[in-house]
Amino acid sequence: MTHLIAGNWKMNGSPASAKTLTSGLAAKVSAGVKAEIVLCPPAPLLAEVAATMGSGALTLGAQDCHANEKGAHTGDISAVLLKEIGCKFVIVGHSERRADHGETDAVVKAKAAAALMAGLTPIVCVGETEQQRERGETGAVITRQVQSSLPENATAANTVVAYEPVWAIGTGKTATTADIAAVHFQIREVFSALPGGAGAGALRILYGGSVKGSNAQAILATAGVNGALVGGASLDLDDFWRIIEACP
Ligand code: PEP
């Protein structure tokens, strides 16, 4: 399975920096690359990135979508529109959206369903908080989030799951490779029992949480890891490239 490396720029960047970063990456991938690379800039920069990335190995993703196709939802973005402007992926259920916007598993599930309906691949994020981890609830939280955040028609072919321990996002802390392997194994097991779970062995499960050039090789070589969702390090061309090059 080809590893998938998704760069989540969050609320960072400008038209100028988007152009510089994307053109730098496009130049590097033109020599050949082992991974599939997705750039997820803030929505106002999607067009800039799309225009700069060319038709090579880079693909476009968004950071969120609304559950409805259109309508009176000021400030929100429809999955259909994202598809029309060239997105192939959309992140849903990122812990920052779950925390900042009160998104529940049901909301995340509806957004993932809208993405699938529009022909986008949702990258559905799950992960435990530090308190949940300390209370020994990681397994239960992950099971609940996978069971409740994925639509019935999610399959290994049309959906990506990202395991992002909340305590590891933007903190410089990463889960141990043993913990990552155990949680990814669990996600695959839970997914296999869902309505679309046949062929769960082919489900792409990304790890996210302070992935950078210096730790990428160990994480990306871990059993059950099929790529990474990268925040901070995706804004640095050289570090992001080191992560891409670390793909086995
Ligand atoms: C993320 O935003 O999904 C993320 C993993 O961030 P960081 O790599 O900065 O921890």
Image (spheres, rainbow, N blue to C red):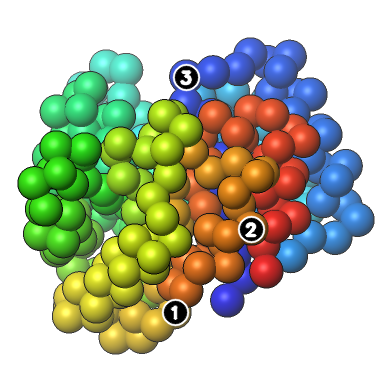
> In terms of image quadrants, where is residue 203?
bottom left
In the image, the residue with mark 3 has its CB under 8 Å from the nearest atom of ligand 1:
no
Residue 77 place in picture, x, y as percent: 36, 30
Q: Is residue 19 left or right of residue 86?
A: right
Residue at the image position 60 percent from the left and 34 percent from the top: 233
Q: Is residue 2 visible?
A: yes
Q: Tag 2, which secondary structure?
A: helix
Q: What residue is pinned by disc 3?
A: 11
Q: Is residue 126 above or below residue 236?
A: below
**Amino acid type, callout 1:** Ala
Residue at the image position 40 percent from the left and 82 percent from the top: 201
1 vs 2, front mark: 2
Q: Which mark is residue 217?
A: 2
> In terms of image quadrants, where is residue 160?
bottom left
Residues at marks 2 and 3, CA–CA distance in whole angstroms? 27 Å
Residue at the image position 34 percent from the left and 80 percent from the top: 200
